Image (cartoon, rainbow, N blue to C red):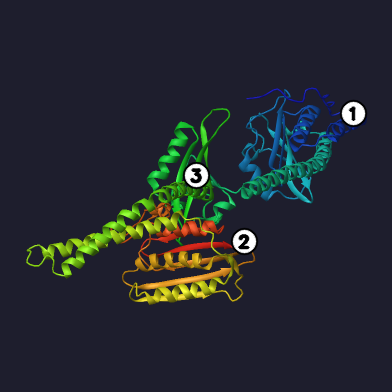
Amino acid sequence: MPQTSPDKRLSVAPRIGADSEPAAELKFVSELGRKLLFTVHPKKVASRVAESIQSGVGAEGCLFAAELDNIGVVSCAFDERGEVLTGFLNRTRFEKWLELLPPQIGHGEENPDEFLLQEVEHGFEYVSPLHINGQIRGAIVVGFESKADLTDIKARLIDAATQMAAMSVNLSAHYEAAINNSINQAKEEHRRFTEAVLDSLPISLYVVDRDYRIVTWNRHREIGSQGIPRDAAIGRNVFNVLARYPEGRVREEFERAFTTGQIERIEQQTVADDGSTRHWVVSKVPMKDPDTGEVTHVITVGEDVTMRVEAIHAVARADKLAAVGRLAAGVVHEINNPLATIAACAEALEHRVEEGDFEGSDSVEDLNEYLGLIKSEAFRCKSITTGLLDFSRIRTGERHPIDVAEILRSSANLISHQKRGENIEFVVEADDDLPLVNADGGQIQQAVIALATNAIDAMPDGGRLSLTATGRSNRVTIEVSDTGIGIPTDDLSKIFEPFFTTKEVGKGTGLGLSVCYGIITDHGGRVSVRSNPGKGTTFTIILPVGRK
């Protein structure tokens, strides 16, 4: 449908007739030049040229059409009433015309089947090509009722206006391209800045749309054992990318976020290939359309809280150890006295049996068995109380610079002579330039032996026990590794607690690792564990260098 011209505030060009004076022609050209002087947008150029020519030559309609680089087809048309036309350009014929047009200034067309101008009743078209940068990139098409309505003066004016329009639209196209380039450059810089910000965050972040396609994947999500390269994630279905996770659970999390629009925080644990456990807080953050309120995307933020969780566990463990230590210090001596009496009585009865005081009794064998049980259990209780004393004792000792490599070699030598396990291969490795550690050598050896004996117990069918030491300027790291049965993931956070043991009843007191933990922390160090069930376990001790 015709629309009112948006440019009616501009003066209409003088109409040129068959007997027009040269002054009128000059006025037409000058007014068109004035209109185009500060016109910087190609569509405005098209509008002003088409309107001026239509009104100036009294045509049935005028069409401006040009195909410009980086912009596409720019077109505009006016009818005899000076109203803007819609659906006025036959695009198919126009594109064909651009390909086949001979290099002429202008030509007429009386065949309606070849007309470029639509929605205007006319019997003749005058086509004046637009030459831009040496190429014909479009045309100004003027429709007349008949061929007789096109005079030589009108043709000259149309051709002159076409040349002016070609220069103006070329300049405006360059201006538009420059503006677009600036806008695109600004958008690209903003995109890069936003991407750099997301990549700098110490969190894993990715975004999915409602089709569950990944649209953002930051650098931190690429690194680590759980990392996936960005190129392998962007544009793909999130359930395919996160195939290692249970799809049902992941889908439920995203569906809740899209449905409820509520932020949800989920605690998760992952186990790396080396057996270390990482703790995460994963947040699902819905993004809403500000106009409709509909959730369009969901941001997933994963924060590694392993250090925080381990610190909380360490504080809780320290509190438990302190409580048990206070309890042990208060009752061990009271327990040891009756235990000593029980053991002494059992030994006295055993001597009487050996001396024949109970000869002739039918229960002598039972008595021997019971006395043996009483004595062995009393000594087992004694070992537990001794462990409690070790655990509760303030470990001062004599601290002086020690060679950790020598501690590892002597520990391996002691354990190998205990014949504690069969088919155990001992491997001891240490850096040549290992710095000395200010510590009590006996206590550090006690801790290493406690870890090593546990490692041997975890390899009932044999395996390899490795004791290694590496050093830096400020610390020495000791690793005790085995190839045994490993520790269940659920037990890793509890193994340093007093009386916790995975061994069978009667085969462990559950105090060895607690004592080890106390020794290392008293020396200002740290002890940690990583384990792969079925593959082995590694305990890591970190001791500071030069601590007084």
Could you tell me residue 415's position as x and y percent? 40, 73
Is residue 518 visible to us here? Answer: yes
Quarter where residue 169 is shown:
top right
Which residue type does callout 1 highlight? Ala
Describe residue 206's horizontal placement relative to residue 132 as left or right. Answer: left
Mark-to-mark CA distance, 1 and 2:
102 Å
Quarter where residue 175 is shown:
top right
Which residue type does callout 2 highlight? Arg
Could you tell me residue 52's position as x and y percent? 80, 30
- Which residue is depicted at the point 46% across and 66% down? 446
Q: Which mark is residue 547?
A: 2
Whether 158 is drawn above or below 487: the answer is above
Q: In this orientation, which residue lies closer to the viewer: 519 or 138?
A: 519
- Quadrant of the rendering where the C terminus is positioned: bottom right
| Circle nearer the viewer, 1 or 2 | 2
Describe residue 410's horizontal placement relative to residue 544 as left or right. Answer: left
Q: In this orientation, which residue lies closer to the viewer: 339 or 284?
A: 339
The number of numbered badges drawn on the structure is: 3
Residue at the spot of label 3: 281
The kind of secondary structure element at disc 1 is: helix
The kind of secondary structure element at disc 3 is: strand
Which residue type does callout 3 highlight? Val
| Circle nearer the viewer, 1 or 3 | 3
Mark-to-mark CA distance, 1 and 3:
80 Å
| Circle nearer the viewer, 3 or 2 | 2
Mark-to-mark CA distance, 3 and 2:
36 Å
Whether 35 is drawn above or below 375: the answer is above
Whether 146 is drawn above or below 284: the answer is above
Residue at the spot of label 1: 24
Which tag, 1 or 2, sits closer to the chain's start?
1
Q: In this orientation, which residue lies closer to the viewer: 48 or 245?
A: 245
